[in-house]
Amino acid sequence: MLEPTPLIAIPIFKIIDAIDAVATMLLNPAHPLRQAAEVQLAQSSSKEMAQLVINDLFCQLTKPMLVQLLEEELGDPLMLDTFRPRRNTKGLVKAYGPRLITHILPGNIPGIAVMSFVFALLVKSHSIAKISSHGPSLVPHFLSALQQVDPTLSDAITLILSGENEKALINEAFNKANLVILYGSDETVRTVWAAIPPETKTIVYGPKVSLGMIAKEEVSPTLAQKAARDIALYDQRGCLSPHLYYVEDATEALRFAQWVAEALDKIPLSKGPTNPETASAIQQWRGAIPLKGGTVFASKEGVDWTVLYDPNPSFTISPCARTIFIKPIPDLAHVITYLKPMQSILSAVGLAAPSSRTPSLLDDLGRLGVSRICSIGKMQEPPLIWHHDGRFRILDLLRFVDLEP
């Protein structure tokens, strides 16, 4: 097991430059590591999807983006190196990251693990991680590139591999950690939480759902194409994937459902394989919706995509794999009523509505627990500075020491 040596002596801009160099390597289509990463991801999606996922991740890990993140949250990135003047009063302050972070990471979205390691490096922490084996991983390619750029930083990340000693190694990692970052289902969180020492700070990212809301004035084929992109990216595997769209007016909602179906049928991002359990759930919904007065738009073959026009306004969790509910509603303000039962797991809302109608609605969504409101078409591509589950990406990892005058 890793016995970490401090990274605190490494200047923050040297760390940023190293991560930027890794991003440059993996954004280069001709680089062998980039090509290997594409092959890895294409095992569970398409080549086009793999390219998009890699580009979206590493475009955010360039020097300008990393500096912007630190300036957004800290004000002064050099606070991670030395005592720096406070912004609004006399005295100095310095930020310290945990000596060791233990990560329990998902495999469904390839970039999450890489992001978690990058944030740990930015606060000068060593990492021990267990990554779910479900789904392809970009971590080996990221670590190989980091090893070429800066072996010291690469050596600061240790992976726990599956095997007979896995459970003992994870428990040891929990006992040594100053911070645990835990992703997973409710069942995973409950199981893992019991093994974490009660005094250890833990940040939990549990399961979340997202949705879209569309005013009748905004319904159009162009908006449907943007919605189809949100549905298709990652095949709805992430917390930012929409499960449904509420659309004002039943006629407009049905028209929007048809346009979304047409867009999904033509979208250039090929779909990955669908497991038998999910395929069975999709077929059940295809059979049930007409019995409830709804309409089904479906791919000609298999379960490549499914659009379900459902007159029941209650929030419905999609089986995913490009399966989307379109639900009519008389007024967007009524949506809040149907979101209240889901408030503990709400993540993002893609919103298309005139600005004159949004002020009270935005505040209602914020009070309900939504942590991100964005344009439809951008739901799956948050900026690096977004507050994941309403949290800071860097500040939540740090503690601060004040030096008074």
Image (spheres, rainbow, N blue to C red):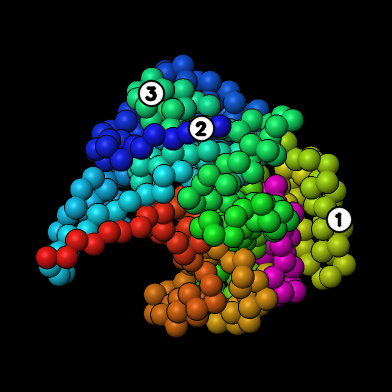
Is the residue marked by circle 2 packed among few (<14), some (14-19), or many (20+) residues within 10 Å?
some
Direction from residue 186 to residue 112 in the image, left or right:
left
Magenta residue span: 308-326
Residue at 60% in and 55% down: 197
Q: Which residue is mark 1?
A: 284
Q: Position of residue 16 (x, y in %)?
A: 30, 37
Q: CA distance from mark 3 to mark 1?
A: 52 Å
Residue at 31% in and 59% down: 400
Amino acid identity at mark 3: Pro
Earlier-in-chain disc, 3 versus 1: 3
Direction from residue 280 to residue 53 in the image, left or right:
left
Earlier-in-chain disc, 3 versus 2: 2
Mark 1 and mark 3 in contact (Cβ < 8 Å)? no
Amino acid identity at mark 2: Leu
Q: Which mark is residue 151?
A: 3
Q: Which residue is mark 2?
A: 2
Reply yes or no: does residue 314 show up in magenta. Answer: yes
Quadrant the C terminus occupies: bottom left
Mark 1 and mark 2 in contact (Cβ < 8 Å)? no
